[in-house]
Image: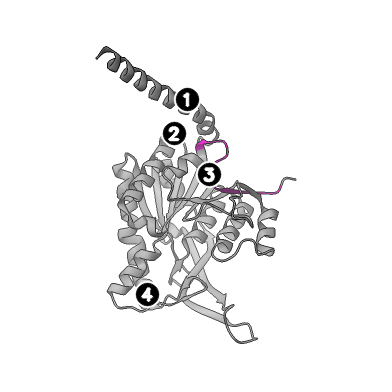
Amino acid sequence: MVNTLTENKDKIQSEWLKKADFLTETLPFMRRYANKVIVVKFGGNAMGKKEYVNNFAKDIVLLQQVGMLPIVVHGGGPQIGEMLSKLNIKTEFINGLRITDAATIDVVEMVLSGVTNKSIVTAISNSGAKSVGISGKDGNLITAKRLLKVDDKSDSNVVKAVDLGYVGEPEKIDPKVINALINEKMIPVIAPVGMGLDGQTYNINADTAAGAISAAMKASRMIMLTDVSGVLDQKGNLISELTISQAEDLIKNKIVVGGMIPKLRTCIEAVLGGAEASVIMDGRMSHSLLLELFTEHGVGTIIRRDSK
């Protein structure tokens, strides 16, 4: 009995020492990011799972509690698709972007600015922080313009411009509303819906919106949570760090292909626009945000400017 009590005591003390060691290791990183803006893009299928949303919210709240200034930009593609299906509204995609007509844009705004946005706000609030959900239309945060894409799958030898409808891209970011919320110790949760100069509502890719906001806020980090570990080399191994020129070479040499290309370009543009660095990483990993920010080498791919 005595031996059992002693063993339990030793085990508990060992666990305490591990936690103390971890705190000691993380303190320098907490100081590094104190009062720094961290923009996190959250989305995909993970948003449909309450457990993932709650764990994400706890990590976001912890970032604020240790002195960082977190901003969440979220997507909602699967949720939009589900609602369109329920309403029997047909939807098509070109180059990964949803063609958005008048009926679809109403659903997009309803889903993104409504239930999806508020579910994240609720999770953050339940985790101990004050949070406010807004869209890019609030406070003229995102002034958008219509996005025209080229259909690279067209059989014609003539370049074919495709009108995606009410799909937009950021033309101007006015961060006043974000700064106002941060100054009140609130965590902004932003739906990627913008408004054009003509008053039209536009659906904006969440990655693109996060990149533009990161640049405007001069973020210390723009963290893009995905369903892959990061940027991979030709052998499928994770590349932990890239300069902008190295990232461009990966695209040029077709080592990076498919959906990773626009993500990497968004990261490049965010850094060129004013963010200190961008990160592409696996958001499905438990506490991946904390591992990225509070450990020496992180867990994803970080993109920085070329050294002078």
Q: Overall secondary structure of the magenta stretch? A: loop
Q: Nearer the viewer, residue 100 or 254?
A: 254
Residue for badge 2: 66
Q: Label 1 to label 2, Cα distance in Å?
A: 17 Å
Nearest the viewer among 60 and 37 is 60
- The Cα–Cα distance between marks 4 and 1, rounded to whole angstroms, is 52 Å
Q: Tell me if residue 197 can be seen.
A: no
Q: Residue at x 34, y 51 (%)?
A: 120
Q: Residues within 10 Å of mark 3 (few under 14, many from 20)?
A: many
SS of the residue under disc 1? helix
Q: State how far apart marks 1 and 3 are (Cα).
A: 20 Å
Magenta stretch?
Answer: 294-306
Is residue 299 on the magenta stretch? Answer: yes
Residue 41 lies in the magenta stretch: no
Alpha carbon separation for disc pair 2 and 3: 20 Å
Q: Secondary structure at mark 3?
A: loop
Q: Residues within 10 Å of mark 1 (few under 14, many from 20)?
A: few
**Considering the numbered disc 2 on the image, is that residue within a helix, a strand or a loop?**
loop
Residue located beneath label 3 in the image:
299
Residue at (36, 53) in percent of width and height: 133
What is the CA distance from the residue labelled 4 to the residue labelled 2?
41 Å
Count every numbered label the image shows and give the total.
4
Q: Amino acid at mark 2?
A: Val
Residue 21 is tagged as 1
Q: Position of residue 229 (x, y in %)?
A: 52, 51
Q: Which residue is mark 4?
A: 104
